[in-house]
Structure formats: structure tokens, C-alpha cells
Image (spheres, coloured by chain):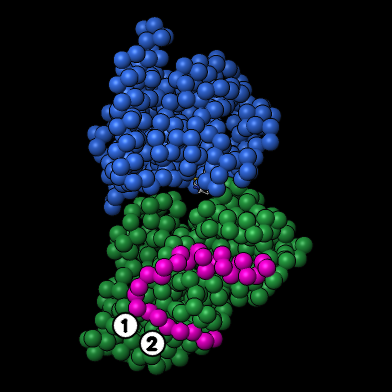
Amino acid sequence: MSFTLIGKHEKDSRANRDGYVTAMLEMMEKDLTVMHVDCDLENCINTGKLAKAYPERTINAGIAEANAVGVSAGLCATGKTVFVHSFGCFASRRAFDQAFMSAAYAKLPVHIVGSDPGVCAAYNGGTHMPFEDCALYMSIPDAVVVDPVDYAQINCLTKKLAESGKFSYMRMIRKTFTTVYGDGSDFEIGKGVTLKEGKDVAIIASGIMVDEALKAEEQLAAEGISAKVIDMFTWKPLDEQLIIDSAKECGAIVTAENHQVKCGLGSAIANVVIQNCPVPMEMVGVEDRFGQVGAESFLREEYGLTAAHIVEAAKKAISRK
Amino acid sequence: MQKAEKMQQLRVFAQEIRLETLKTIGSLGFGHVGGSMSIIDALAVLYGEVMKIDPKNPRWEDRDWCVLSKGHAGPAMYATLGLKGFYPLEDAYTLNQPHTNFPSHTDRTKTPGVDLTTGSLGQGMSTATGAALGNKIDGRDNHVFVFVGDGEADEGQVWEGAQFAVHYQLDNLVCFVDDNKYQLDGACENVMKHAKGIGAKFAAFGWNVVECEDGNDVEQIYDAIQTAYATKGVPTCIVLNTVKGKGATFADGTGAHSSQPSKEQWDEAIAYAEKQLAEIKAQ
Ligand SMILES: Cc1ncc(C[n+]2csc(CCOP(=O)(O)OP(=O)(O)O)c2C)c(N)n1
């Protein structure tokens, strides 16, 4: 693992989806088994580029997610390396039985990509806003579940997932997003990334919350509180050692996720903490609520997904030591 | 009233809905213009003439139901219901704003007059079918209308619902297929084709099928519904041969799924719709 931290809270000029598309183009050129399957959402993630370059290996399955995942499992059985995409809500809820049985249970390592995680579904509204997609996929034995943040991380993880040979689910923020990492950064599935060292509290975040965690660290530092910041982009398998070490070092933990906390990253981390080194914990994320329509900025406030919420949670966790 | 007069009124109503739909989406600046505009003539016939409704009592038990399975056409529904007096028209201009009752996709818990919640394509076909069965069990003399997109009909669930509706002889169910030839990634012909046409599929499932050569013509739609009403023992599918984006100057004929035109283009589209309305009224 070798990465460069940019973390200036500035938007990338490129859309995150292009991190995926670029990785796919590279893999498809080198490896004739690599395929992309879409569900009438090529225009949303720019995979029309793949269709142009590799028409036989870029398949549009139409608006039929369950079938698309089943077809992907069948393709996989013929030795193909298959990535299949829809919005996160449909890539999880709509095709879950097929993902579970035809793919994972049958040991066919299909790679499922769900775009617009959580509040990123914004104007598509509550029907399209998955706060439970990772929960579903984490429940599948031996599945890999990742929630990357930016262009560079998506680019790297797409390739790593293909190499892993494991059934996987990747959330993908598809539009332009704040750059956290420099291009060429390298990540290892199952290993969290320590972005800042600290001793009073460990903030463990992923996806859109990583940049918020970095902002929270700056605000806390200004108040004399030293926070460790970890990007836990792999939700499963979880980097248990890093969690245990951080709990011991800092004595308090805050988790932050764009997902329901009661069945997401926070609860998965709590599981590790409680069995190994109980310390006060606070969880920032969505509390047992459905999504709703609106601008992403509004939704972040509405569901408490901001740096300010992390700062508050950090102080609370520390006060409970 | 003479039929010709009735049809003239429906043409006016349809154009009023077009104008309101543009204003509703235009209040935000972007949205699903294409799929909203194509079904407006059918909505006009339903709400302007055919359906039994009570705007003051949206959940009236004996009402006819309307389910927008292609839920992203919500703005067209909002304009229609607003014009019928279910709520003040301007309410819909809160489309997609914080805590709005008018979200992108139709939601039964939010908007008066919306019967079932949709957004995940395919699901409205099943829920409409369930509502038709429930009404039938209760012996009501009413109908359930459901709108399915031609792209949406890729979903297996549409056909599971179609199979169920025939098995349970739901002749109180009418399915409109908005055959506007486009889905999100482009022409259905290229993304996922209905090899022998959607009508042929429904016919093969045992439905009574009526094709509207011009699915944006109120009279053809009205006549098709009369045929549906006269057909007993099986549900009816009305295939509407429509134009995606019909009447929106920036989208008509382009096949565009969602649009984010400039301010000038919005002004032009609204001005054109107003002019059209005046012309139709003058006929
Ligand atoms: C289950 C599901 N998959 C994908 C989508 C995303 N989506 C919304 S509209 C659309 C295209 C719909 O095409 P069509 O049914 O032909 O609608 P129309 O052209 O009438 O707007 C897609 C893929 C969705 N809403 N639901």
C-alpha cells in the first residue's frame, strides 16, 4: 500500500466514474476475459466508452437488474471476469437473491457495482437512496464490500477486485468529488488507511465521509484535540487489527458512514471493539430512516453527515472515557 | 355533450398539463422531461373525462386508481392533479426542494391523489395488479390504470404482473404502455428490443391489446379506453405510440431522457406551450 494524501477538500476535475472506466479500459485491453454488464445506465457512468472500445465485452442488459446479475454469474462460469452495474439501490435490493445464490453461493465471483450510494442519489429521491446496500452485501459469507471515495481509489480498487477473484460489491460515487488521494495511490483490500495520526480519538470513515473526517480533524486540532483519521474503505473483510490498535491508542472511536449505522460500518466496527477492547464509541451516519429527495448538501445536513457532526461525536466519545 | 366538443376540451386540458409540467420541472431547472411529456395526453383523457375521482377526497373508496409505474414521470402527474384541484398548482413548484411533497418519483405517502409509490421500475405493475384484485374482491365497480414505460417493460416483474392479471381475470385493470421508443441509454431498439413489439407480448400473455397509432391523440386514447371497458374477463393493454418529450421544444424528437436546458431554452419552451394552448383553445 502506498498512497499520497491530497486532502485539500477540493473537487477533482474528473468524475469518479472515470476512475472506474479508465481502470476497465486498461484491464479490458490486457485481459480478454474482462467484461462490463450494465442495466440501461451506461450514460450515467460513462461506460459508453467501454461499449465503443470493446463492444462484444460490454453488455447492456436493459432495465432488468435481476437478470443482469444472473447473466453475469453465467458469464463468470465461463471464465469471464464480470463487473455489473446499476444504481446502488437496484444493484443491491433488486438483484439480491440472484447475487446471493447464482453468484456468491455458487462461488462465482461476480463484481457488483452500485452507483449513487446513500445521499449521492440526491434528486432521484428516497426510492433511489440506498442506506442499506452494504448491509445486504456484508451479510453474504466471504463477500468483499468496499466504499471508496475518489477517482484514484475507485481506479485502484476496480483492478484489485478483479485480481481478488472474490465476489464483491463496490459502491461508487459517480460524479465529480473531492480529491482525497493522488493518482496512482495503491490500496490493499481489507487494510484501512491511516490518514492522520492522533491520540485522543480515532475517526474511522469511508466514502463521502472521509473528507468530512479530515475536516473534522482540522477543527478538533484547532481546539487542541488530537484525532487519528482512518479511511476504512473495506467494510468487509474488516481491518480488525487496525481497529483494535486504534482503540488502544486513542481510547475512543467515532465512525462515520453514508449508510444506516445500525447495520453498517459503525456496527461492524462496534462488533470488533466490544469483543477485543471496549472503549467509548459514537457513530455518525443514518439512524433508521428512509432516504428522501433533495440536493446532496441539504441531505448531508438532514441526515447528520457533516464534519460538524463528527466533531460533536468526537467530543462526546472523549467525554465518556 | 357531443364527442367532438369533449375531445376539444381534452386537447385543451392536455396542453394545460404540458404547460404546467414544463413550469413544474422548470422551477427546478432539470428533470425527466422526456417521459413526462409523452404520457400527458393519456393523463388528460383519464383525469379530464374517464376517471371517477374526488379531488376533495383523494382516497375515496370507489374511485378509479392511477399508478405511474414509470414513476419518474411524476411531474406530469403533479401538474394533472394540481389542475384538477387536488392541491394548489404552485405546490408542485416545490418539486425536489427540501421536505417537498413532490419528489421526482410518485409517492403515495406524500402527494394527494397519488395511489401507489413507484420509482423502482417494474414494481407499479404488480402493485396496480394487487389493487385491481383488491377492488374486485370488494365488488367495486371501478378501474385501475397503470402506466408502464417501453424501457421499463424490460423488467421481468412487468411480465410477472401481466401473467397474474390474466390468471385472475382482472378486467378492471388497464395498462398503458408508453411506447415512446426510448429508454435511458438510447433507443429501445438498441438497448433491449421488444422483438415483435410490446403489444404482441401482452397478447401472448392473454391480454386484450389495443394499439393507438397516435398515442398523443386524445380521441384514439378515449376510444381505446371504451374498448377496454367493453372487454370482460381479461385485462386490457393500450399501447400508446408516443413521442418522448412531446411538446417540449428542447426535448421533442431528441429521445432525451432527462434534460437540463438553459434558462433561455426553458423560456422558449414555456412560451411555445403557451402559444400552443392559445391556438388549441381557438380551434
Ligand atoms: C429498477 C430500476 N432500474 C433502473 C432505473 C433507472 N431508470 C429510471 S428511468 C429509466 C429509463 C426508463 O425508460 P422507459 O421506461 O422507456 O421510460 P420513458 O422513456 O418513458 O421515460 C431508468 C433506467 C429505475 N428507476 N428503476
Q: Colour of chain A?
A: green
Question: Mark 2 touching mark 1, by CB under 8 A?
Answer: yes
Tell me: residue A36, above or below residue B121: below
- Residue at 22 percent across and 86 percent down: it is A223
Instruction: Name the quadrant containing residue B113.
Output: top left
Could you tell me residue A200's position as x and y percent?
32, 90
Residue A306 seen in this snapshot? yes
Which chain wears blue? B
Q: Nearer the viewer, residue A278 or A221?
A: A221
Q: Look at label 1 and name its amino acid.
A: Glu
Question: Which class describes the residues within 10 Å of circle 2: few (<14), some (14-19), or many (20+)?
Answer: some
Left or right of B277: which side holds A91? right
- Check the residue under mark 1 and report the chain it is in: A
Could you tell me residue A43's position as x and y percent?
52, 53
Query: Which quadrant is the N terminus of chain A positioned in?
Result: bottom right
Residue A11 forms part of the magenta stretch: yes
| Disc 2 target residue | A196
Numbered tag placed on residue A217 in the rendering: 1
Residue A234 forms part of the magenta stretch: no
- Residue at 42 percent across and 9 percent down: it is B3
Query: Which quadrant is the C terminus of chain A positioned in?
Result: bottom left
Q: Nearer the viewer, residue B241 or A316?
A: B241
Left or right of A297: which side holds B121? right
Q: Nearer the viewer, residue B259 or B75?
A: B259
Determine whether the residue tagged by mark 2 lies in a helix, strand or loop. Answer: strand
Highlighted range, magenta: A1-29
Instruction: Name the quadrant containing residue A215.
Output: bottom left
- Check the residue under mark 2 and report the chain it is in: A
- Residue at 29 percent across and 83 percent down: it is A218
Q: Look at label 2 and name its amino acid.
A: Lys
On whether disc 2 and disc 1 are found on a single subunit, the reply is yes
